[in-house]
Amino acid sequence: MFFSVRNLIVFSVFLLASSAICFAGDAPAVSIDSGDTAWVLISAALVMLMTPGLAFFYGGLVRRKNYLSILMQCFLAMALLSVQWVLFGYSLSFAPGTSWIGGIQWFCLRGVGLEPYTDYAATIPHQAFMIFQGMFAIITPALIIGAFAERMKFSAFMIFTLLWATFIYDPVAHWVWGVGGWLRNLGALDFAGGTVVHINAGIAALVSAIVVGKRTCCDKYTIAPHNLPFSVLGAALLWFGWFGFNAGSALGANGIAVNAFVVTNTAAAAAALSWALIDWIINGKPTMLGTISGAVAGLVAITPAAGYVGTGSAIVIGLLSSVFCFVAVTTIKHKLGYDDSLDAFGVHGVGGIWGALATGLFASKAVNPLGADGLFFGNAHTFVVQLGAIAVTAVYAFLGTLILYKIIDVVIGIRVTEEDEAIGLDLTQHNERAYTMLE
Amino acid sequence: MKLIIAVIQPHRLEQVKEELYKEDVNLITVSEVLGHGRQKGVTEVYRGVKETGNLLRKIRLEIAVNEDFVERTISAITRGAKTGKTGDGKIFIMDLPGCVRIRTGERGSEAIG
């Protein structure tokens, strides 16, 4: 868990600062580092760009009658959750509270100022940490869109996203990252959000696909992507933004950030390569969609491990992530018969679980002395803790998401009518179309 | 020889194709068209400006067949495209005076199949 590392960093910085006080007298106990602050702000902007990136990635894969609906869901998630986050989301996730949920004392950022909050990040303003975390809170619910794409009512989407962020994301973020969070105290390793972001959203995606049901006519006919170049653009933006996601999670411009940057790029590359090769071997030709799916699978898998593993491990993590995700989206999905339209579970759920396990296998103190050794470096305990964290998050996300859907379905219904689905969500939910045919 | 032109709902194309293959009708031309029948069009709104009665996307099939294939082609299209709702589309049947296969120069019924 990256906060335990941060704590140690914070603690050592604090010790240094205290000794400075002892020797220098009136030096401040905490001070803002301009390099760290600049890096975290840039990283926040990079992570922000991932949500539009995701919109293009997903949008290219749907039929063109539903293209705007995907862009709209992603864009509106950004708007809705930005406001939710500063109003109460950040407080529920990060304000000191119980071990299950944060407090409400930071409502509307009361008390979240421009001085560092040393429990989270000692060298950057508290609000820099807040806005960096806010971008994670936005993209996580947006990831789920891939599972219910092309058939969810827009009103139901809005309510679901708000409730899911509040009742699933915020508590889980608190368990893993918040002061006093119980998973944080157990000592699980999650550098940049493999558990909180990817497993959490991935499992919610699986529930979505099951509860919302299949798209009409997806049983017998494959639905071809309407514009793969958009998906490639989206995947490229995701890869770019992921440097902020992972390297930014070091919360400073330091060596760990550089390690995270390098392994992130390496794992994405290895996974893109391996998916292309698998395609080539199994289907006869390497495909563009396979290659970008691989890159994203690699990025997902390296997320929890980025601050703890070396480059060699990153190659293995990436190569294998594509293998697992490939099996999930080409075999398991069809065997179990759920319609995860854009494979949000197949890539984020499966890749996230593999990443969290891989962290327990490949983590090494030689890379990051403040982390832990994994199973392959002689410490089985780390692996067991990872297993536990995965299981708890998966169960909570599964049940919580299921309950939210049932409530929304009873109150307003979650699915559009069959007729609206046939015409497309762009026209029926938004009165617009993405492409004209004449002129 | 007849030329059968059908205008159908875009989301029924796969079913229609499947029904046609079952009847051994394999040579079809498909194009995307905009149309407006009894089904009311859709309203689109761009920055508050309303455009009502817009045209809906439809699929147009063109199939040239010999006389003995006419009825089964019609019935295949009907089976595939029918949902029972307004907007299912129409089938037009017209006489076809001639047909040439470019590759071989064959003419008439020979060239159609």
Image: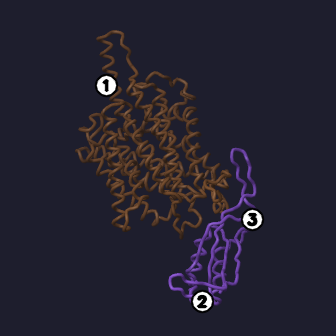
Chain colours: A brown, B purple
Residue placed farthest to the right in the image?
Answer: B38
Element under disc 1: helix
> Which residue does the numbered mark 2 point to in the structure image?
B109
Q: Report the number of discs.
A: 3
Say which label, 2 or 3, has the lower sequence index.
3
Q: Amino acid at mark 1?
A: Ser
Element under disc 3: loop
Q: CA distance from mark 2 to mark 3?
A: 37 Å
Q: Decide if residue A223 is on the left or right side of residue A252.
A: right
- Same chain, labels 3 and 1: no
Whether residue A124 is visible: yes
Chain of the residue that carries numbered disc 1 in the rendered image: A
- Same chain, labels 2 and 3: yes
Q: CA distance from mark 1 to mark 2?
A: 89 Å
Q: Nearer the viewer, mark 1 or mark 2?
A: 2
Whether residue A410 is visible: no
Q: Decide if residue A27 is on the left or right side of residue A367.
A: right
Q: Amino acid at mark 3?
A: Gln
Q: Decide if residue B54 is on the left or right side of residue A183.
A: right
- Judge the density around disc 1: few (<14), some (14-19), many (≥20) Cα neighbours within 10 Å: few
For the N terminus of chain B, the image quarter is bottom right
> Which residue does the numbered mark 3 point to in the structure image?
B39
Chain of the residue that carries numbered disc 3 in the rendered image: B
> Which residue does the numbered mark 1 point to in the structure image?
A12
Q: In terms of depth relative to the viewer, which is nearer, A129 or A18?
A: A129
Q: Amino acid at mark 2?
A: Ser
